[in-house]
Amino acid sequence: MSGATSLLDAIAGVGTDRRGGYSRHGFDRAEAELREWFTAEATARGLDVHTDRNGNLWAWWGEPGPDAVVTGSHLDSVPGGGAFDGPLGVASALAAVDLLRAEGFTRSRPLAVAVFAEEEGGRFGVPCLGSRLLAGTLDTDTARTLRDTDGVTLAEAVRARGVAPEHLGPDPETLGRIGCFVELHVEQGRGLVDLGRPVGLASSILAHGRWRLSFSGEGNHAGATALADRRDPMLPAASLVLAARRAAASVPGARATVGRLVPTPGGTNVIPSTVDVWLDARASGDGETRHVVAEITEAAREAAEAEGCTVAVREESYTGTVTFDSALRDELAGVLGGAPALATGAGHDAGVLAHHVPTAMLFVRNPTGVSHAPAEHAEADDCEAGAAALARVLAHLAGV
Ligand code: HGY
Ligand code: MN
Ligand code: MN
Ligand code: MN
């Protein structure tokens, strides 16, 4: 890292800034500051930083060119997130550049560090927004009209960041430059802890998606309205939460989560007129995931009808099971002198790009196993081991 800043200090600094100012919006102040941090750190290393048509940052070592080796991750967060999910991959990429320069590394291929916008989908509800737009796996018209909780559209948000909204969308030129992509990420789970290893390689990602269920009833007075006269959408919403756990529990390895439920208008003494519920469901395959979601939405419809309410169900994003390229994974395990392969339930930009270019993920041990919460952690020496492993992988892939 530049000056005396250690890798961990940089991550803690970025993560803390981020955690403190939680980048609720993928293009708002908190992330804007983190993007400035990255641009300054990359420029200090002689990398040439560009912003692509979808707001992703690209720091090039040498001219942008075909068959580039790309590494990187994201800087945005979830509400109350930890300091490592995203920033560890970005800071480690910069630290790996330092290590390669220090050993006099000579490139045989272009090399870039990428920072993808809005990976958590915290502002516009679509995870991996920047990498999906890049890869063309998200309908551009739909994307442009995505709105945040303040009603700001993605088009308005990117324009405020100097990105022309009419340019949002598939970017085959940028995508075409990627020869392979390697993302380093803090592990979100205890696989490496249980194996007693500091670094591992990702084997697969669960199929995962997000659905929005909007329950509508009749807003009314909490005190003046007899129970028999109510059409309270909070009841079917509550049923949905319990149905989600039941449905996921019936499919081995499946997960279903309701982390966000918004009654409108949201007064203590007001029966809500509508309740919006966001469902995050994941399982080992499309069939399993769709089965879990079908069970949940069926229960939601029944509960809505019983309360004289209606429910609208909308799929907001979906990514099928990701299986990382086993040949590349085995090659990199060899470069690292053996590194365990780990499945994960967490989605990543690497999961989006894996459908388009040879892609691998490095995981760094998280002693708590916890993620998307302040307890998310990685020890300093494991962070350094991760950056050193990434440097060896990049040297193998991009060296002479
Ligand atoms: O939700 C996820 O799996 C990732 O953290 N975006
Ligand atoms: Mn995350
Ligand atoms: Mn992440
Ligand atoms: Mn009153």
Image: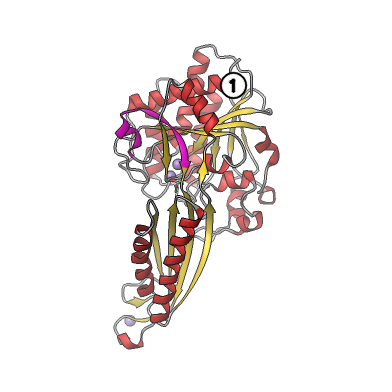
Question: For the view shown, which residue lies furthest in the top direction?
Answer: 104
Q: Position of residue 231 (x, y in %)?
A: 39, 82
Q: Position of residue 80 (x, y in %)?
A: 36, 48
The residue located at (32%, 31%) in the rendering is 195
Q: How is the image coloured?
A: secondary structure
Report if residue 199 lies within the magenta region: yes
Picture layout, residue 304 above or below residue 42 = below
Where is residue 343, by image quadrant? top left
Q: What residue is pinned by disc 1?
A: 398
Q: Residue 286: image x %, image y %?
A: 51, 54
- Reply yes or no: does residue 170 show up in magenta: no
Query: In the image, residue 16 lies at what x, y percent?
Result: 37, 38
Horizontal side of residue 266 vs 93, given as left or right: left
User: Which corner quadrant holds the N terminus?
Assistant: top left
- Would you say residue 6 is visible in this rendering? no
Give the amino acid at mark 1: Ala
Name the secondary structure under disc 1: helix
Closer to us: 137 or 104: 137
The quadrant in which the C terminus is found is top right
- Give the residue displayed 65% in from the left and 47% down from the top: 136
Please rate how many residues cluster around mark 1, counting C-alpha atoms within 10 Å: few if below 14, some from 14 to 19, many from 20. Answer: many
In this rendering, is residue 284 above or below 303? above
Residue 126 visible within the image: yes
Q: With respect to residue 163, does 232 lie above or below?
A: below
Q: Is residue 52 left or right of residue 104?
A: right
How many numbered tags mark residues here? 1
For label 1, being within 8 Å of ligand 3 is answered no
Give, as a single range, the part of the protein colored magenta: 190-204
